[in-house]
Image: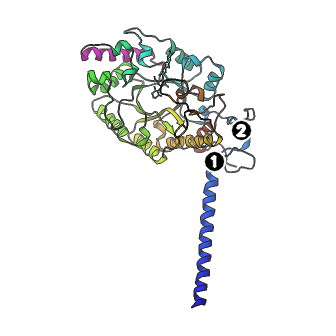
Amino acid sequence: MRYKTSTFQKAHLKLTVLFFTILITNLLACKSSMEEDLQPVDEQSSETVLAARDLDETAEKGSYHLKGYTLKDVFDFPIGAAVVYERLNQPLYANTLKREFSRVSSESNFKFKYLQPEEGKYDWEKADGIVDFALKNNMKVHGHTLLWANDGTYPAWLRNKEGSPEVFDKIMKDHITTVLRHFKGKIQSWDVINESLTPDGKYVDNLFLRKLGPDYIYKAFKYAREADPSVKLFINDFSLEYAGKKLKRYLAMSDELAERGVKIDGIAFQMHAVLRIAMPLVEKSLKMAGDKGLLVYLSEFDVALRYNMPKVFPLTDLLSRQQGQKYKEIVKAYLDNVPKRQQWGITTWGVGDKDSYFNKGYVNFNHDHPLLFGVDYKAKWAYRGFIEAGLGRQNKITLD
Ligand code: G3I
C-alpha cells in the first residue's frame, strides 16, 4: 500500500511539475511578446515589426521617428491633426505637421462663435488661414463644427437672442449655408453637429433644441446637404467607443434621417481615449458603425494618462510605453473593424503635448501628455505604436 501510494505520488508530482513548467513557459512567452512589442529596437531584437536599421539615424536621442516612414505615407487614408491658427507660424509645429500629416482639422477656428461673432458678420481670417496652409501643403481639411449642442459654444448675440422658432431656423440655415458655400471645394468633410446626445441617448439641451425641437438635427443636415451636395457630413461625439446607448441612438438616427431623405455620411468617434479603456468595447463599437455602412472617422484621437494621477505628473518611460501600446491597439482596432472603403481617417487632437487642450491652462482642463509628439516635437512611443499598427497591417516592412 505504502509502495503504491509512493508511486502514485511520484507520478502526481511529475505531472504537477510538468504542468507548472508549461504554464510558466507560456506565461513568460506571452509576457515577453507583449514587452517586445514596445522594446526599443536594437540589433538583437528579431520580433519587432521594425528592425534597428529602420530607425531614423538622424533622429535625436529619445525620438522614435522611423527612417523613410512618416504617418501619412504609411496609411492609405488621411492622417490629421487639429491645429490652432496662431501656431502655424511656429517652425517646429508647422514642419511636424507638413512632414507627418495629410489632413488638418481645427480646435476652435471653425466654431460658430468664432466664424460669426456678430450677427450676420463673419470673420474668416483664421479659418481661411488654416485652409490656405492645408492647400499649400497638399492636405485635406475636416471642418469642426457647424453646430455644437451647448449654449456656451454660441456667440453672445445668439445666446441672448429672442424670437420665434422661424427666427432661429433662419439663423441656423443662414450660418450653415454661408459657411459651407464659403469653403466649398476646399473642405471635404464637416461635423454638422457636435455632442448632441447624452450618454443615455437623450438630446442634449441647447438653444436650437429648445427653439426647434429634436428636428433641429434633421434640419441642420438638410441645410448642409442643400448648401454643398458633395461634402461629407458627419455626426461627432465622444464616448462612442463604449458601444452604449449614445452610439446606438446615433446609428438609429442615421436610419431615421435617411428615411426622411437626409443622409448622414459618417460618424466621427472623437476617441478621447484613456489608458484603461477595454479594447473589446472599442472593437465592437467600430464594427457597429462599420456595419451600418457609414464612413467612420476618428476625429479627436488622443490617449490621456491622467487617471489616478496628481494634477501635474511627469511622463515616465513606463507610461509612455503603455500609451504607445494603447495607440497601437486602437489604430489596429480601426483597421480591423472598419471596412477599408469606410475609413475616413484618423485625426489627433493636436500635434505635440504642449499643444494639447489639456495643457493650455483653460478652465476645467487638466494637465496631460496625450499626443504623438512630446513638448519638443520628438516622436513618442505613442507615435511608434500608431505607425507600427499601420506598418504591421500593410506589411510594408519584411520581418527579420
Ligand atoms: O481665444 C480666447 C482668448 O482670447 C482668451 O484669452 C483665453 C482665456 O482662457 O481663451 C481663449 O479661448 C479659448 C479657446 O479654446 C481658444 O481656442 C477658450 O478659453 C477655451 O475654452 C477653448 O477651448 C477649446 C474647447 O474645445 C472649447 O471650445 C479647446 O481649445 C478645444 O480643444 C476643445 O475642443 C473640443 C472639441 O471642440 C469637441 N470635443 C472635445 C474637445 C476637447 O474639449
Horizontal side of 110 relative to 162 (left or right) equals right
Q: Is mark 1 within 8 Å of ligand 1?
A: no
Of all residues, the one furthest to the front in this rendering is 310
Relative depth, front residue between 141 and 249: 249
Residue 55 placement (x, y as % from top left): 71, 38
Secondary structure found at label 1: helix
Report the amino acid beneath label 2.
Answer: Leu
Report the amino acid beneath label 1.
Answer: Asp
Circles 2 and 1, Cβ within 8 Å, touching? The answer is no
Label ID, residue 265: none
- Give the magenta part as a residue range: 161-190
Res 1 → quadrant: bottom right
Of all residues, the one furthest to the top in this rendering is 121
Q: Is residue 186 magenta?
A: yes
Position of 294 relative to 123 (above/below)? below
Q: Is mark 2 within 8 Å of ligand 1?
A: no
Label ID, residue 37: 1
Of all residues, the one furthest to the bottom in this rendering is 1
The residue tagged 2 is 55
Q: Residue at x 36, y 29 (%)?
A: 196
- What secondary structure predominates along the stretch shown in magenta? helix
Residue 232 placement (x, y as % from top left): 42, 27
Crowd band around label 2 with a 10 angstrom C-alpha radius: few (<14), some (14–19), many (20+): some
Q: Earlier in the sequence, mark 2 or mark 1?
A: 1
Relative depth, front residue between 145 and 227: 145
Q: Is residue 106 magenta?
A: no
Res 296 → quadrant: top left
Position of 268 relative to 141 (above/below)? below
Residue 271 placement (x, y as % from top left): 48, 36
Label 2, label 1: how far apart the Cα atoms are: 15 Å
Q: Residue at x 34, y 30 (%)?
A: 263
